Amino acid sequence: MLSQLILFSGFAGITVLIGGLFAYYFNHHVKESAIKYEITHTISSFGAGIILSAIALVLIPSGMEELELFPLIIAFLSGALIFMSIDLQLSKKGGQTATLLAMMMDFIPESIALGAVFASDNNSATLLAIFIGLQNLPEAFNSYRDLVMSGFTSKKTLTIFFFLSFFGIIGALLGHFLLSDSPTITAFLMTFASGGILYLIIQDIIPESKLDNNYFVSIGAVLGFLVGIIGEKII
């Protein structure tokens, strides 16, 4: 059973590296053009839609199911305020890491939830792993672009993604061994992550993905959210 958990969470994590490799190929082997620019922004908005669906369909419902109103408010607001302070510090240094932060804020708590759920509901855990893996592809694609624009080399960025891809296994094992019997702590973590992710989406990711006089890019966000609806419906 443990080997299955490692396999599922490993799949969910490896898509971080795959998304980064796809972004590397796209950036270096596709000629610069208006279409390339539009595709990049559409993928960015698609990723924002998927992250938003994770908040609305996975993270917040889990928090509301387990937490009373006051702890729910504290967890949500503390996530937003802490990541606002992180964002302020990063902006002073000129970094563009909002998408990476949002991806990890999404990826880690969901991986922990995957491990916690695995012991009691193997089918849901399998589908959740697929859902997380699909989320990570566009998010990693956008994060690669942001990190390279911040001054990271392609090699350094892909190395970071290689190590981040193992976070799924680590998070799932932590959730399985430490939080299977602690749904309140897991719910608090998910709600905290939701506050931080929502701040990052509104402050950085959505404005960055917008193009003047282009309306198809916004459809990317709608399609991204639809992926989340489909995944949640299947689960």
Image: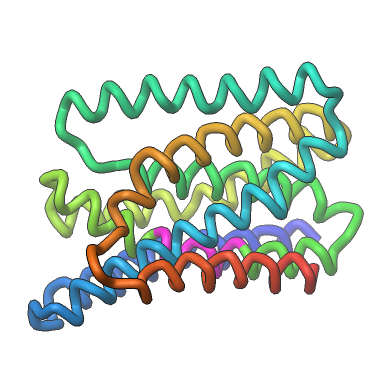
Tell me which residue sits at (63%, 42%) in the image. Answer: 109
Q: In the rendered view, does 156 fall on the left or right side of 206? A: left
Q: Where does the image place residue 99, in percent across and percent down from the top left?
A: 37, 48
The answer to which image quadrant residue 203 occupies is top left
| Magenta stretch in the rendered image | 132-139
- In this orientation, which residue lies closer to the viewer: 219 or 8? 219
Question: Of helix, strand and loop, which mostly describes the magenta segment?
Answer: helix
Q: Residue at x 41, y 25 (%)?
A: 84
Relative to residue 132, is residue 168 depicted above or below? Answer: above
Q: Which quadrant is home to the C terminus?
A: bottom right
Quadrant housing the N terminus: bottom right
Q: Quadrant of residue 42?
A: bottom left
> Is 92 placed left or right of 132 in the picture?
left
Q: Which residue is at 35% across, 72% downward?
A: 215
Residue 77 in percent (x, y) is at: 59, 22
Q: Is residue 155 magenta?
A: no
Q: Residue 46 placed where, x, y %?
A: 44, 67
Q: Position of residue 230 (x, y in %)?
A: 70, 73
Residue 229 seen by the camera: yes
Whether residue 137 is visible here, answered yes or no, is no
Residue at figure coordinates x 53%, y 63% from the top left: 135
